[in-house]
Image: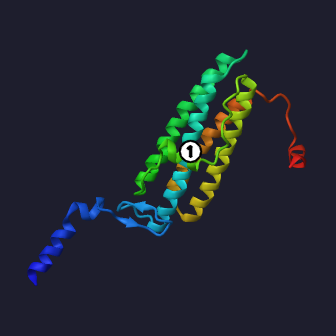
Amino acid sequence: MASKKQGNGARQSNPDARGVSRLAQQAAEGTLLYETKNPLPVETRARAVELLNHRLADCIDLQSQTKQAHWNVKGPHFIGLHKLFDEIYEAAEEYVDLIAERVVQLGGIAEGTVRVCAERSTLSEYPLVLSSGEEHVTALSDVLAQFSGKAREAIDELDELGDPDSMDILTEVSRGVDKWLWFVEAHEQTRPVSAQGARSQR
């Protein structure tokens, strides 16, 4: 009897059994989680990981679309837009890391391969035949706005889940994307639109 107890104790003290073993396939649609001492409930972590991985796919797509614009923009505002699009690309790279690292902090697996992102991204596909600065400004402002909207949806759901730290990360990312949207849209905005006028257009 004693030897059995000792054997069980030995298994429990095994580091593989504590942390890195094939762990918990948790309830949220089979999201695979590693064991962690993070105090959030496992169901919360599983759902947060799922949400964040979807926004990760969007962010990687946003990053690649920004580089597409950077490479191909032409016209009288080439230099300014070429530099601006590259700055947005570098910022998006930081946002990707923030989101992916939060996934892993929650015990999840950051799913950021190109193939996975192509399947999951909710952003509009970037047209390959654009060249003028005006066309790229319109296309890139569209996807920046789309990403910002999806980030806000995830922030609201994370609030309901009770994960303020993941909320903070997406809030930081959303705030940054809004700034870049402002910079890009400034190249096409010429006249203000009243709030009343904007409502009537909906």
The image position of residue 37, as x and y in percent, is 35, 62
64 relative position to 130: left or right: left
90 relative position to 81: left or right: left
Residue at point 56%, 31% (across, down): 89
The image position of residue 69, as x and y in percent, is 63, 28
> For residue 139, what is the image quadrant?
top right
**Way the structure is coloured:** rainbow
Residue at point 51%, 48% (across, down): 116
Count of residue discs: 1
- Give the residue number, with chain letter if any, for mark 1: 118
Q: Secondary structure at mark 1?
A: helix
Position of residue 143 relative to residue 7, above or below, is: above
Residue at point 57%, 27% (across, down): 87
Position of residue 31 relative to residue 115, above or below, is: below
The image position of residue 189, as x and y in percent, is 80, 30
The image position of residue 3, as x and y in percent, is 9, 79
183 relative position to 49: left or right: right
Position of residue 10 relative to residue 19, above or below, is: below
Residue at point 36%, 60% (across, down): 34
Q: Quadrant of the N terminus?
A: bottom left
